[in-house]
Amino acid sequence: MRFEFSAGGIIYKKEGNQISVLLCQHAQHHGWVFPKGLIGDNIEGESKEATAIREVKEETGAQAKIIRPLPPITYWYVWEKEKIKKTVYYFLMEYTGGDTTKHDTEMEDVEWLPANEVEKRLTYKADKKVWQQAIMLVNPKRFDF
């Protein structure tokens, strides 16, 4: 058994009364997810916050600033016959710029969705759980960031 720690973001932007949220489709497993990556895989001693900002930029092409941390999500998966317990530290992030067509090859697609369509598009239970936490932490009336 091995332990992994990642960080990522739920990125939103507000245009008029419309809230959009950035999702990406993973090139390997084709699931729709929030961007995230391993803490310290490229930069020794990198903080959770720095990892989240870097991974969002790499995987989506978007630049974003952290608004607030979200409760961590933990789940298990198997990779090359090894059981891995993964903890992901997500941050609610506000889009500040960038070009979503300039994402890395780890993601095959990056798309802005209206907030009320996000949960339907997400593939994994852990992402749906953190999405529900993000909504409730920001405003219990939902979708009013």
Image (cartoon, grey):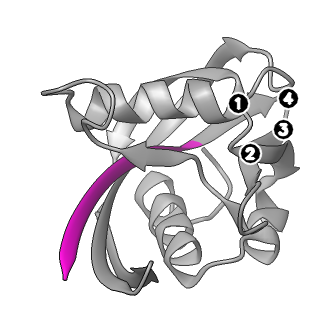
Q: Is residue 47 magenta?
A: no
> Would you say the residues marked 4 and 3 are in contact, meaning their CB atoms lie under 8 Å apart?
yes
Q: Which one is earlier in the sequence, the residue at label 4 or at label 2?
A: 4
Which residue is labeled 1 in the image? Answer: 104
Viewer-nearest of discs 3 and 2: 2
Q: Out of 9 and 80, give the one closest to the viewer.
A: 80
Query: Compared to 144, does 103 lie above or below?
Result: above
State the extent of the magenta-drawn residues as a range.
Answer: 1-10
What amino acid is labelled 2 in the image?
A: Met
Provide residue 38's location: percent of width, then percent of height: 35, 46
Residue 17 disc label = 3
Which residue is labeled 2 in the image? Answer: 107
Circle 2 packing at 10 Å, graded few (<14), some (14-19), many (20+), is many
Viewer-nearest of discs 3 and 1: 1
CA gap between label 4 and label 3 equals 4 Å
Provide residue 101's location: percent of width, then percent of height: 87, 24
What amino acid is labelled 4 in the image?
A: Gly
CA gap between label 3 and label 2 equals 29 Å
Which residue is labeled 4 in the image? Answer: 16
Q: Secondary structure at mark 2?
A: strand
Q: Which one is earlier in the sequence, the residue at label 1 or at label 4?
A: 4
Q: Quadrant of the C terminus?
A: top right
CA gap between label 3 and label 1 equals 30 Å
Viewer-nearest of discs 4 and 2: 2
Mark yes or no: residue 70 visible.
no
Query: Compared to 50, does 77 lie above or below?
Result: below
> Would you say the residues marked 1 and 2 are in contact, meaning their CB atoms lie under 8 Å apart?
yes
What amino acid is labelled 3 in the image?
A: Asn
Q: Quadrant of the N terminus?
A: bottom left
